[in-house]
Image: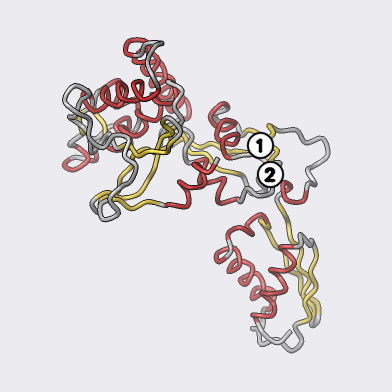
Amino acid sequence: MRGKEEIRAALETAIEGLHKRVELNVAEAELSDRPDLDVTNIYYEIQRDKPRLKYAYDIAVTWEADTLLCELSYMPYQTGEFPDGFSGISVSSLDELIHAADTHLGKDPVSIKVTNRALEPDMMNRALQQCGGGYILCALNRDGTQIEYSPAAGLSMSECLDGLEQAGQLADQVIEDLLEDTMTERERAEVLFSFVTETVHYDPRYESDLEHMPYASRTALGALKDGTAICGGYSNAVKLLFEKAGIRCYNVSGSYQGQDHMWNIALLDGDWLWFDATAGRGSSLKYGLRHFAQEELDPLQYQWKEQAVSELCAE
C-alpha cells in the first residue's frame, strides 16, 4: 500500500465486511514514524465521514516490521455474536428503543438486544434524545448492548426521577379534567395544546436572569406545576400530554428566528403535523389556535435536523 487512501479503502472494506483482523503491509506507504497512530487516525476519519460504520466501535493496531495488524471490535447487533448468556430487551425499531429507555429510566443501565442491523448507532442515539423528559440523558454504551442514563444539569438522579413523576401525575390530572371519551383525536389535541398555550407563561429569566431560572422551566414540570417555562418546557409538556392522550409525538430541536428552540411534531389523524406551543402561547381554542397542526413550517423561520425527524416519522 502506497498511501493513506489505499489504507482507508482497505479499512472501509474490512468494516463493511465485518472482518475482525486486517493486515496492512505499509512498507511502501508514505506514513510517519508511527504508522500505527496514522492508521488509528484514518479509522477515526472513517467514523467521522461515514457515521453508519460506527458499529465498528474500536480498533487496536499493533506494528511489526512493515506490517500493521488491525483488530476491530463490532457492536454485537451487527455480527450477531452476543456474549454467552447475554439477555436484554429485544429492540427492532426506534420506537421499541425509545420505549425500552423510557420504561427503565434510572441510575442503572438497561441491557438491550438490537435485532435490526439497519439501525445505525447515530440514528439510535438521536432517537434516545426523545427520552428522559429533559431531566435524564440517555445514550447507547460503546458496544450498543446497553442504554445508559445520566442526570441533567448537575441534578441528582433521584431529583430527576421525582421531577418526572410529578410531571406525569400533573399530566394525568389534566387528561382526567379536560378530555372526554367521545372526543376525536384532533379534539383531544386541540384541548391539550390550548391548555398549554393558555396557562403557561414564558419564563423571562431566560433572557434577563438565567442564573436564577429553575431547571424545571426547561421541562414539563415547570409548565404544568408552575405555569412557567421556556421552549423546552412547552415542548416537553405538549409531548407528555399528547402521548398520554394516545397521540404519537416527538420533540424537535433547532432554531426559530435565529434562536435555539424546541417544538413538536405529532401524528394526528394519520398525518405528521407541526406544533409550536411556545410561538402559539396566548392563543386559545375559543379564539383560534396559532402554530397548531401545521402541514409545513416556514424555512426562513425554522431550521431543524431533518434527518433526525424523518427517521422517527418513517416508523
Which residue carries the number 2 mark? 116
In the displayed structure, 118 sits above or below 19; it is above
Task: Classify residue 234 by image quadrant.
Answer: top left
- Residue at 55% x, 42% y is 139
Horizontal side, residue 72 vs residue 209: left or right: right
Query: Label 2 vs label 1: CA separation?
Result: 7 Å
Please, what is the three-letter code of the amino acid marked with disc 2? Asn
In the image, residue 122 above or below residue 153: below
Q: Position of residue 18 (x, y in %)?
A: 76, 59
Q: Quadrant of the C terminus?
A: top right
For this view, does 166 lie left or right of residue 46? left
- Check whether the beta carbons of the residues at disc 2 and disc 1 lie within 8 A of each other: yes
Q: Residue at x 33, y 10 (%)?
A: 177
Q: Residues within 10 Å of mark 1 (few under 14, many from 20)?
A: some
Quadrant location of the N terminus in the rendered image: bottom right
Given residues 241 and 185, the one toward you in this image is: 185
Element carrying mark 1 = strand
Q: Position of residue 314 (x, y in %)?
A: 53, 43
Q: Label 2's element?
A: loop
Mark 1, residue position: 91
Identify the residue shown where x is 56% and y is 26%. 103
Residue lying at 66% horizontally and 36% vertically, measured from the top left: 91
Q: Position of residue 164 (x, y in %)?
A: 43, 24
The answer to whether 240 appears left or right of 98 in the picture is left
